[in-house]
Image (cartoon, helix red, strand yellow):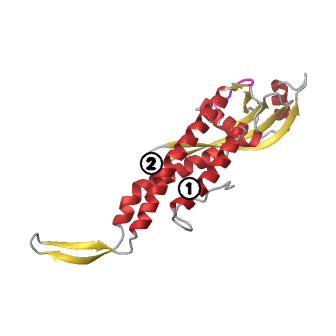
Amino acid sequence: MEQRLSDNWITSNHIDFEYKKYILLAYLQHVNDCFEETKLYPALSELVKHYRNLVALRDQKNSLYNSFPEKLNSADLQNFKLVYEKLSTDDRLMTELESIINFSIPQFEQHLAEGKKIYDFIESKLNIYPIGIVPLHTDAGYLLLKNGDKNETVVFEYQITIFDQPTERYRAIGVQYVNSFEKTLRNTYENIKSDLLRYNKNLPNPATYVIESELTLPFEDTLLPLAKRTLVKYLH
């Protein structure tokens, strides 16, 4: 079963509709299996990437065809016009490419809709709130994660970086694992923060946030990626 699609999966090897259909459906079956296990990443982000590539390829198909070189075929002297024909074009190839694109885009849209539905449901089950006094600067600090009925709190140090583009401003979040604390009467979130303050003098007054999941989720594939996005959304 195909678990990953290369960025150029449409144009690599044979451009044949039935062959590409087989490759795509095998990959999407893997995506379905991930979604059934509530594993959203990297499947969801890959779906978005491939869908955008397909739409761009569809939009560029005509300009791609128009970019082929031409040779003079005849002269229409009555209308004072030279008639050219395309070189190195393969009508069958372009037809196959168009068939692959037209089949693939709805398939990706269907799976993206399903992934978004799962994402939104899980996001609604995440609760976020600060621990202690919130400092003026919140782009660096600690993130405490509680995964459903798991008997531990997992702590990460986070850092948010801002990237300015001509039309938009992007925020990226990086996290680094710090420690895990077993749930006990002593290990309250406030006490965990106090321990972090004692052991890391580089963050004297860190912003500290808890995200609790009402569901027990795959940690690396779902909870951590969604928690990072939830924190960025909450802060900005």
- Residue projecting furthest to the left: 78
Q: Position of residue 8 (x, y in %)?
A: 55, 61
Residue 58 to residue 225: above or below: below
**Which of the two residues, 122 or 27, is positioned nearer the viewer here?**
27
Q: Say which mark, if any, is on residue 166.
A: 2
Q: Amino acid at mark 2?
A: Pro
| Image location (x, y in percent) of residue 144 | 77, 32
The magenta segment is 131-136
Quarter-of-image position of residue 75 = bottom left
Q: Is residue 32 above or below residue 56?
A: above
Separation (CA) of disc 2 from disc 1: 38 Å
Examine the rendered structure and indicate whether residue 74 appears above or below residue 103: below
Circle 1: element type? helix
Q: Are marks 2 and 1 in contact (CB under 8 Å)?
A: no
- Residue position for label 1: 21
Looking at the rendered image, the disc whose residue lies closer to the viewer, 2 or 1, is 1
119 relative to 132 in the view: left or right: left
The first of marks 2 and 1 along the sequence is 1
Rendered position, 188 above or below 163 = above
Residue lying at 64% horizontally and 53% vertically, measured from the top left: 26
Amino acid type at image mark 1: Lys
> Mark 1: few, some, or many residues within 10 Å (few <14, many ≥20)?
some
- Image quadrant where residue 187 sits: top right
Q: Main secondary structure of the magenta part?
A: loop
